[in-house]
Amino acid sequence: MRKESIAKRISVPGFDRITFDPNVMGGRACIRGMRVTVSLVLNLVANGMTVEEITEAYPYLEPEDIYQALRYAAWLAEEALYALEPATA
C-alpha cells in the first residue's frame, strides 16, 4: 500500500491570502491555495493591467488578493544593506 504524503498549506503571518504548499505550483507563493502565483499577479500589474482588468481576466481572484500580493512583494523587498568588513587573519 502506498503512503500518501499530506502537505500542510502554510501562510505568512499578516498575509492570510498568500499560501505555500509543496503540492501546488512547486511550493511557490500562491493566492489562497490556488494555482495562481504571486509572481503572475505581480507581472500582470507590472505590465500595466489594472485591478479591474485582472479580476475580469481571472474572475476567481478578488481585489484584496492583488493588493496583498503587492504588499507581500514590498515586504520581501524591504531589506537592509550592511557593509562587510574585510576578514582579518
Image (tube, helix red, strand yellow):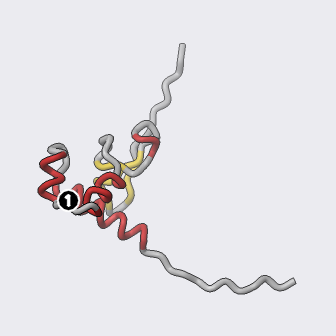
Q: Would you identify the image quadrant in which residue 89 lies? A: bottom right
In percent of width and height, residue 63 lies at: 16, 57
Q: Would residue 84 appear left or right of 74 to someone viewing this image?
A: right
Q: Residue at x 42, y 71 (%)?
A: 77
Number of marks in picture: 1
In percent of width and height, residue 39 lies at: 36, 55
> Badge 1 is on which residue?
49
In percent of width and height, residue 40 lies at: 32, 52
How packed mark 1 is, by other alpha carbons closer than 10 Å (few <14, some 14-19, many 20 or more), is some
Secondary structure category for the residue under label 1: loop
Q: Would you identify the image quadrant in which residue 74 lies? A: bottom left
Disc 1 marks which amino acid?
A: Met
In percent of width and height, residue 2 lies at: 53, 17
Q: Please name whichever residue, 56 or 15, is drawn nearer the observer in this view of the structure.
A: 56
Q: Residue at x 31, y 59 (%)?
A: 42
Q: List the single residue furthest toward the front.
A: 47
Q: Would residue 75 appear left or right of 66 to someone viewing this image?
A: right
Q: Residue at x 43, y 36 (%)?
A: 23
Q: Please name whichever residue, 61 or 46, is drawn nearer the observer in this view of the structure.
A: 46
Q: List the single residue furthest toward the top.
A: 1
Q: Residue at x 45, y 32 (%)?
A: 6
Quadrant of the image containing the N terminus: top right
Q: Is residue 45 above or below residue 79?
A: above
Q: Is residue 68 above or below residue 11?
A: below
Q: Is residue 28 above or below residue 86?
A: above
Q: Please name whichever residue, 14 or 75, is drawn nearer the observer in this view of the structure.
A: 75
